[in-house]
Image (cartoon, rainbow, N blue to C red):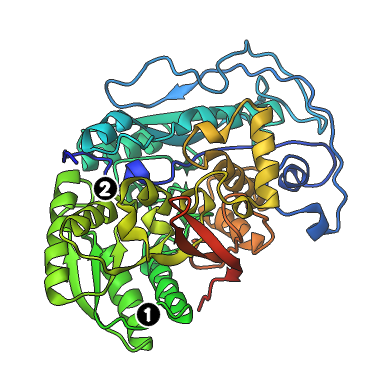
């Protein structure tokens, strides 16, 4: 495999997120109508004791200028939502202004998102030619068009603000420029995540400007989510501290740790990874009578060459030291792949504990199957855990409704290489539910947080098995299933039923 410095070593195999939805026509709050009538997994009519009534869609004019905020080299003309009409106004069955609307009392609202340019070429150059980075922008645009045609966000037309990350650019510089686009060039209500540099600077910068980031899929340890509880909202993520605790505890309950004497971990550098290992993995191992014997930290989490060098070097160290269980705190799959390739070349076959952060579907494509043969673990993101169509139990009823909604908008997730549509449904169910308590869509982050917390476990998610919003930290995944590698299909598969994730 060729090694090339790239800003997408992690991002290339991570979830690309984004976007929006609405609908219907009764006096029930907008988000609850959407959840009941459109395939979004918001608070259901049954949960509210309500009967959903679907109104007409009315006119669907989608005029209005598109706001773009891109780094140099990006396309000036973006075929985005709101760019196809001439400003005609219409109404939905609920009597709300459609995309061409907007009054002095209800001005348009800006929502930011970002996406990556050049990532697929970088993947091919790095030797991951079998993988594709899905383009989140068309999915975001389609959902915005749909929402604007059905009344916008609380009656306000959405104007997208874009930032384009370029592969090969300075990670920290691009995060700073993206933050400037969203908070200075524009004043967005919030930012919906996509694929960025992986440097981790964007959220802290947005927080300084009082702008929430929803579904960035970059993750964080338990302290990170506590610190940024008003700004970091992840419908489909589990914090790294809890994830490592869950992995070890469940491997023990499966009997997988029998015969394990020494444990090693490969991790990325940085406080959130250090904290996850120190406060999650180390105590979890102690509770099952083990300790962390070896720990290798890569010198970078964005430079593919550095990740490859450290990961393959770890193989010799672990093999020499007799490590018989290998774990990873390197989200995305790059370090895992390099380690397993090196282990295969050196005739080293330890046990592996794998979880959703490792992107199991990626490993099934890039890592030697001989290394994965004994792998077991836990998963909570079907789109990253199991191959599409190879495990029908991975698609929940809500996911099926969401995918049908996507098809009605001309979207087909099977061609995206990632569960973007399911993620969009969940993101927008949360957004629409949260503004029930903030109908004016004000820039009051405390009010937005209160609205999210009020959702509790009421949302039936499309991208994961269970979701629960808890005050003080907003990594909302609440259910998981066990994972095992199936030699027959050369893929990971789920076993058993959905289990609740233990939380303090």
Q: Position of residue 120 (x, y in %)?
A: 32, 31
Q: Position of residue 15 (x, y in %)?
A: 43, 45
Along the line of sight, which residue is nearer the eye, 333 or 453? Answer: 333
Q: Is residue 380 above or below residue 384?
A: below
Q: Residue at coordinates 27% horizontally, 32% vertically from top-left?
A: 124
Query: Could you say which disc has been placed on residue 199 in the image?
Result: 2
Q: Position of residue 410 (x, y in %)?
A: 62, 25
- For the N terminus, the image quarter is top left
Is residue 41 shown to the viewer in this render? no
Query: Could you say which disc has been placed on residue 306 in the image?
Result: none
Q: Mark 2 or 1, which is nearer the eye? A: 1
Q: Is residue 275 above or below residue 88?
A: below
Q: Residue at coordinates 82% horizontally, 57% vertically from top-left?
A: 46
Q: Quadrant of residue 125?
A: top left
Seen from this angle, which residue lies furthest front?
488
Number of numbered discs visible in the structure rendering: 2
Is residue 489 shown to the viewer in this render? yes
> Counting residues from the N terminus, which is met first, the one under dot 2 or under dot 1?
2
State the SS at label 1: loop
Residue placed under numbered mark 1 in the picture: 257
Q: Is residue 248 above or below residue 414?
A: below
Determine whether label 2 and label 1 are within 8 Å by CB: no
Q: Quadrant of residue 412?
A: top right
> Could you classify mark 1 by the number of other residues whose Cα lies within 10 Å: few (under 14), some (14-19), or many (20 or more)?
many
In the image: residue 93, left or right of residue 131? right
Along the line of sight, which residue is nearer the eye, 245 or 229? Answer: 245
* Mark 2 → mark 1, Cα distance in angstroms: 34 Å
In the image: residue 269, left or right of residue 113? left
Q: Position of residue 464 (x, y in %)?
A: 57, 55
In the image: residue 95, left or right of residue 322? right
């Amino acid at each position: 495999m060729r090694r090339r410095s790239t800003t997408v070593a992690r991002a290339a195999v991570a979830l690309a997120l984004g976007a929006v939805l609405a609908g219907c026509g009764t006096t029930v709050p907008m988000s609850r109508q959407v959840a009941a009538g459109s395939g979004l997994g918001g608070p259901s009519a049954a949960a509210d004791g309500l009967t959903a009534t679907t109104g007409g869609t009315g006119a669907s004019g989608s005029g209005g200028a598109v706001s773009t905020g891109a780094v140099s080299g990006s396309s000036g003309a973006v075929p985005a939502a709101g760019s196809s009409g001439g400003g005609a106004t219409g109404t939905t069955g609920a009597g709300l202004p459609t995309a061409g609307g907007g009054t002095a009392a209800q001005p348009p609202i800006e929502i930011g998102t970002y996406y990556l340019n050049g990532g697929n070429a970088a993947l091919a150059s790095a030797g991951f030619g079998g993988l594709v980075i899905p383009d989140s922008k068309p999915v975001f645009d389609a959902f915005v068009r749909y929402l604007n045609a059905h009344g916008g966000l609380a009656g306000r037309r959405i104007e997208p603000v874009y930032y384009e990350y370029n592969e090969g650019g300075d990670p920290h510089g691009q995060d700073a420029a993206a933050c400037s686009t969203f908070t200075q060039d524009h004043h967005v209500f919030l930012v919906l995540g996509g694929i960025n540099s992986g440097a981790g600077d964007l959220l802290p910068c947005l927080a300084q400007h009082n702008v929430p980031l929803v579904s960035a899929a970059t993750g964080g340890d338990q302290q990170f989510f506590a610190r940024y509880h008003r700004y970091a909202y992840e419908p489909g993520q589990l914090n790294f501290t809890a994830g490592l605790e869950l992995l070890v505890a469940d491997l023990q309950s499966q009997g997988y740790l029998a015969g394990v004497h020494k444990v090693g971990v490969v991790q990325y550098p940085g406080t959130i990874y250090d904290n996850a290992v120190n406060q999650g993995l180390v105590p979890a191992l102690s509770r099952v009578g083990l300790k962390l014997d070896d720990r290798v930290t890569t010198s970078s989490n964005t430079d593919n060459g550095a990740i490859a060098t450290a990961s393959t070097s770890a193989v010799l160290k672990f093999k020499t030291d007799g490590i018989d269980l290998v774990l990873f705190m390197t989200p995305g799959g790059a370090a895992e792949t390099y380690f397993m390739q090196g282990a295969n070349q050196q005739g080293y076959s330890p046990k592996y504990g794998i979880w959703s952060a490792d992107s199991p579907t990626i490993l099934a494509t890039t890592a030697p199957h001989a290394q994965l043969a004994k792998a077991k673990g836990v998963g909570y993101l079907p789109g990253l855990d199991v191959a599409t169509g190879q495990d029908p139990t991975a698609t929940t009823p809500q996911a099926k409704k969401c995918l049908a909604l996507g098809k009605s908008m001309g979207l087909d997730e099977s061609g995206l290489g990632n569960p973007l549509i399911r993620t969009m449904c969940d993101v927008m169910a949360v957004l629409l539910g949260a503004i029930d308590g903030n109908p004016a869509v004000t820039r009051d982050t405390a009010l937005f947080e209160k609205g999210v917390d009020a959702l509790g476990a009421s949302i039936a998610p499309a991208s994961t098995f269970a979701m629960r919003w808890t005050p003080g930290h907003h990594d909302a995944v609440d259910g998981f299933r066990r994972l095992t590698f199936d030699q027959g299909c050369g893929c990971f598969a789920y076993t058993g039923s959905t289990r609740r994730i233990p939380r303090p």
